[in-house]
Image: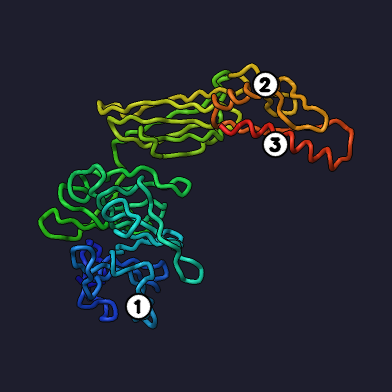
Amino acid sequence: MDLYEATVSKDGILENIKPFSEQINTKTHESNAVFTKDGKTMYFSRTNDKQVQVGDEKFASVKLFKAELVENEWTNVLELPFSSDQFSTQHPALSVDEKKLYFSSDRDGSLGSFDIFYVEILEDGTFSEPQNLGDNINTIHREQFPFIDEEGTLYFASDGLQGLGGLDIFMAKVYDNVFAKPINLGETINTGMDDFAYVLKPGENLGYFASNRKGTDNLYSFIREENERRFIVEGDVRDKVTKELLPGTTVTLFDMDDKLIGQLVVGEDADYVFNTEPNTKYKIVADRDFYASKEQIFETTDDGRVRFTIELEIESYDDAEEIIVTKDDGLVYIQLENIYFDLNKWDIKEEAARTLDVLVAIMKKYPRMVIELGAHTDSRASDAYNLRLSQDRAGANSGIFSF
């Protein structure tokens, strides 16, 4: 296998096909080239020119290389330092900001066969240690051919996730630098054979992928269109008592294995909407400061009902608990009996511990609650002494909450 370039006609036909120079193409395999936006740096896969003994077998590993375009010639070809004779490192893909390089590898740290990893490309041109994307993306089988689109969505091929057979192409959207649960692209792209190496042309809905659906590997092009039939969950977030909308609430969608599907902060209309799949159970959770978290489980169907609306009504701590009140200063307080200390002491007395047990019970009931503890002294002694004693007393209180 060698690397080639071509121009694409208006009809989508590859023309003016020619191989890369002998600086790039060798007697072994080269594949999966990816380029920086300025076109001056290329990363690609190359098979090792020698076989090594690993366990009971001999094999030639695949490595990643980098090349630079100098005066219209590809040169300065270097093996990347996280490649090895002992395992394969292949299928490079650049993040949108070109600060991360994704790849597939069966190195130590993979969950089974090939996993998707990434390294950070540092300012001096060196690389961080490889990081596994984890079991939200990877399985004990093959995950290969990563690609990152302009929105940061990860596309990759897997034969370990639920698919149509062989390698299927999946997508995983990103939320706060965390990839959500992968979604199969469906039978318009995937088949019972191997489908892989999905890429999109920047700024367009034109893309390419490879498949052996006709018996041998071939390249295919496609045009992305908006899916006419959508399964979604939508609704808004309101105060349970006043029914007022609650903009700024964080709404998160999980599958029943608690894997992240999507997350957003609702706007002024307090509306949320998530894409879902048919015949699937989900958990949706609403979180907001000074409110008790609310979660609801629902199941989608495939009987023509493609819109599933949920109203998330969340209750403020003030409404939910008698001992929690909002005062004139706008702060929310938990009203407890006074806790007294002996002179110059910060030990928690037995009666004080019983009072703090009430606070412990509240925090266990609302595990996302965040509280601020304070303590003070009388006016005797110096300011410095009283400050230290106040800190010791607050610290003694906080030590109760190591549950």
Mark before the other along the chain sequence, 3 or 1: 1
Q: Residue furthest top?
A: 322
Closest to the observer, 193 or 344: 344
Q: Residues within 10 Å of mark 3 (few under 14, many from 20)?
A: some
Closest to the observer, 192 or 324: 324
How many numbered discs, if any?
3
Q: Which residue is mark 1?
A: 77
Q: Is residue 303 left or right of residue 274?
A: left
Q: Residues within 10 Å of mark 2 (few under 14, many from 20)?
A: some
Q: Is residue 24 left or right of residue 388?
A: left
Q: Which residue is mark 3?
A: 395
Q: CA distance from mark 3 to mark 2?
A: 16 Å
Figure quadrant of the N terminus? bottom left
Amino acid of disc 3: Gly
Amino acid of disc 2: Thr
Please tell me which residue is depicted at 18% across the width and 49% down the height of the picture.
166
For residue 180, say whether it is visible: yes
Amino acid of disc 1: Val
Q: In x, y percent, where is residue 22?
A: 25, 81
Q: CA distance from mark 2 to mark 1?
A: 70 Å
Q: Which residue is mark 2?
A: 355
Q: In x, y percent, where is residue 257?
A: 36, 35
Q: Is residue 321 above or below residue 197?
A: above
Q: In x, y percent, where is residue 383?
A: 86, 40
Q: Quadrant of residue 348?
A: top right
Figure colour scheme: rainbow
Of helix, strand and loop, which one carries label 2?
helix
Q: Quadrant of residue 40?
A: bottom left
